[in-house]
Image (cartoon, rainbow, N blue to C red):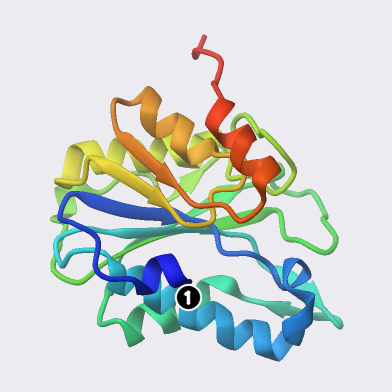
Amino acid sequence: MAFLAAGRLPPGQAVVTSLPDHSELPSLGVEGWRRWFVEVAALACGAVDDGAVAVFYQTDVKHDGRWVDKAYLVQRGAERAGSHLLWHKVVCRAPPGITTYGRPAYAHLLCFSRALRLEPGQSSPDVLPGLGEMTWARAMGTAPCEAVARFLLAHTACRTVVDPFCGMGTMLAVANDHGLDAVGVERSPKRAAQAQALRLAPEG
């Protein structure tokens, strides 16, 4: 949060991240985490230049028999920052028709900007059929990362990806594979070292 609150990022830098689940911040409690989540989403959207984007990959979670819709929480933060939704994609985490427990069979991929607009002809698929390679259980799969990298190159002036919750660095590695610069922030020294060393196998 301190990184995001330090000041607006230079033009040409996009935030692409996945905000932590309440299980990773147990000291906040669920309601405290919900408030924190919205605040950090607002910080992330506010940190990018008006013509840049903030992209979030989030998987809903069930708590006490009720779903927590993280896409809704992200959008509350984005609205607070004056950002609008450019696109919302569903990423299949399991094949259709499969029953899952605790987490749904899909994840959200949402892109926000204050000034950028997309024409209808710039649309891309709303449903991604799979996660691609997973570097760890909580990772953002390579398929959504690749979709984000392609979007940045085709429709924005952003050529640097900033992930303030980078984990093991999947988004950073995919960005580099697409010729984009990448900067990650991670509070776990172990995961930060893994992110620095991560290299993905070439496609095919």
Q: Residue at x 60, y 42 (%)?
A: 192
Q: Amino acid at mark 1?
A: Val
Viewer-closest of 110 and 82: 82
The local crowd at label 1, few if under 14, some if 14 to 19, many if 20 or more residues have their Cα within 10 Å, is: some
Q: Position of residue 157 (x, y in %)?
A: 14, 46
Q: Position of residue 142 (x, y in %)?
A: 53, 34
- Which residue is located at x 39 percent, y 39 percent? 147
Left/right of residue 117 with respect to residue 161 in the rendered view: left
Rendering coords of residue 126 (x, y %): 41, 51
Residue at 57 percent across and 26 percent down: it is 197
Residue at the (57%, 82%) spot, across then down: 36
- Which quadrant of the structure image shows residue 117? bottom left
Q: Position of residue 152 (x, y in %)?
A: 26, 43
Q: Is residue 4 left or right of residue 190?
A: left
The answer to whether any part of residue 131 appears in the image is no
User: Considering the numbered disc 1 on the image, is that residue within a helix, a strand or a loop?
Assistant: helix
List the residue tagged with mark 1: 40
**55 sits to left or right of 98:** left
Please, is residue 149 above or below residue 138 in the view? above
Q: 176 or 3, which is in the foreground?
A: 3
Q: Nearer the viewer, residue 121 or 85?
A: 85
Q: Compared to 46, does 152 lie above or below?
A: above
Query: Residue 54's image quarter?
Result: bottom left
- Whether residue 156 is visible here, answered yes or no, is yes
Q: Nearer the viewer, residue 76 or 43?
A: 43
